[in-house]
Image: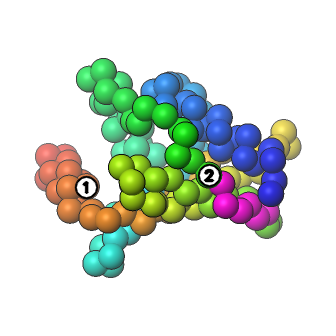
Amino acid sequence: MDQALVDRMREYLDAGLAMDVEALDALYDPEFENVRFDPEGRVVTLVKDQFMARFRALRAQGQRIGETLDDVTFLTTSEYGGQGTIVMRRVPEGVPTLYTFVWRRDQDGWGTLVREFSFERDLGGLLAMVRAAEAASG
């Protein structure tokens, strides 16, 4: 297990829990994509601008994402070609969920988050939100 990658991941999770949008913006790579998929085979990909807009809107509404990180465990890490992957398990509302994060290594260590892959129980609500945003923008 790459402890430096685990530490960087904890920094990211702490920023999310605190709704520190500025820190999150610096942690997300310009090429960041959040790829979510569900049992029906539906896939939603959100780019950095979409993801950051969601965080800013939640913060403006006084909302938070989660209350604690007590349910987080890191299962494995792997480094390859200047990138590193960390697999994380959470148990929100009693439902085990797996995530895979891909980080870019720079001269100072683990730099920015390039990809997040997550398996969701149901993407219906997110798909509706994305479609509504696309329709509104034109």
Viewer can see residue 33? no
Q: Is residue 103 above or below residue 62?
A: below
Task: Give x and y (percent) for residue 32.
Answer: 53, 51
Magenta stretch prevailing secondary structure? strand
The kind of residue on which mark 2 rests is Thr
Q: Is residue 2 magenta?
A: no
Residue under pointer 1? 126
Distance from Cα at disc 1 to Cα at disc 2: 25 Å
Task: Give x and y (percent) for residue 56.
Answer: 36, 29
Tell me which segment is drawn in magenta.
74-79
Which image quadrant is residue 128 in? bottom left
Residue at 50% across / 53% down in the picture? 90
Q: Nearer the viewer, mark 1 or mark 2?
A: 2
Residue at 46% across / 53% down in the picture? 91
Disc 1 crowd, CA 10 A, few/some/many (<14, 14-19, 20+): few
Task: Give x and y (percent) for residue 54.
Answer: 34, 38
Which image quadrant is residue 36 in? bottom left
**Relative to residue 134, is residue 12 drawn left or right?**
right
- Circle 1 — which element? helix
The kind of residue on which mark 1 rests is Leu
**Relative to residue 137, is residue 34 drawn left or right?**
right
**Marks 1 and 2: CB-CB under 8 Å?**
no
Check the image and name the residue furthest to the front.
Answer: 94
Residue under pointer 2? 73
**Relative to residue 99, is residue 43 drawn left or right?**
left
